[in-house]
Image: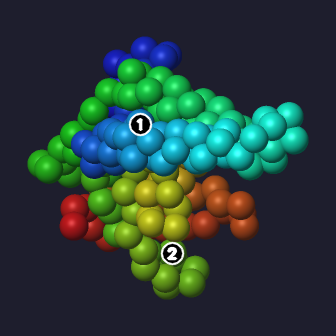
Amino acid sequence: MTGLSGDQQAITPEGLTALEAEIAELEGPKRAALSKRIQTAREEGDLKENAEYHIAKDDQAHMETKILRLRERLRSAVVVEADDGAVVVAFGMPVTVTDLESGKQQSLTVVGPTEASPAQGKVSSESPVAQALLGAAPGDEVEVQTPGGARRWRVDSLGD
């Protein structure tokens, strides 16, 4: 996964789709609903003492800031496709690993930092876990640094 400049961020095709959908939702229905909330609150009278109006305006500012951040992520996103023919762990490729101490097996996918979600088995390509796994082949054992300390994992399989 080399070749990205400092302001570019790798993202999976699925991550790009989710990012575009989130922007569309915020810029469409969410923005319209918030505009309506502001209008309704404005109609209630004196704006200096209108808590609903001020809360809605704060919410609008937060949403517009979020839209700007997401748009910046979209501008810097570079889609990196998983290599279906890869024989080692690579970006965007699901991998099944076994913790050699506990025997617990889990499936992980190395994704860009902005789409990481450990609860969903999506680990950031910048994380120690991904760094240990990238380039490992099925049967390889790797040492993974986790918050709970070093663990030894075996790469069981690649792909779904």
**Is residue 94 placed above or below 115 in the rendered structure?**
below
- Please name the colour scheme applied to the rendered image: rainbow
Q: Position of residue 23 (x, y in %)?
A: 40, 38
SS of the residue at dot 2?
Answer: strand
Q: Position of residue 27 (x, y in %)?
A: 41, 36
Q: Quadrant of the C terminus?
A: bottom left
Measuring from the top left, give residue 53's x and y in whole percent. 72, 42
For the point 71% across and 61% down, the residue is 147
| Amino acid identity at mark 2 | Asp
Of 154 and 104, the residue lying toward us:
104
- In the displayed structure, 6 sits above or below 140; it is above
Which numbered dot is residue 58?
Answer: none
Mark 2, residue position: 99
Residue position for label 1: 27
Residue drawn at (49%, 16%) of the image: 6
Residue at (86%, 34%) from the top-left corner?
48
Q: Is residue 74 left or right of residue 137?
A: right
Please say if 80 is above or below 133. above
Give the quarter of the image for residue 63. Answer: top right
Q: Which type of secondary structure does the marked residue at label 1 adopt? A: helix
Q: Amino acid at mark 1?
A: Glu
Q: Residues within 10 Å of mark 1 (few under 14, many from 20)?
A: some
Please state which of the two labelled residues, at mark 1 or mark 2, is closer to the viewer. 1
Dividing the image into 4 quarters, which one contains the N terminus?
Answer: top left
In this rendering, does residue 107 appear at all? Answer: yes
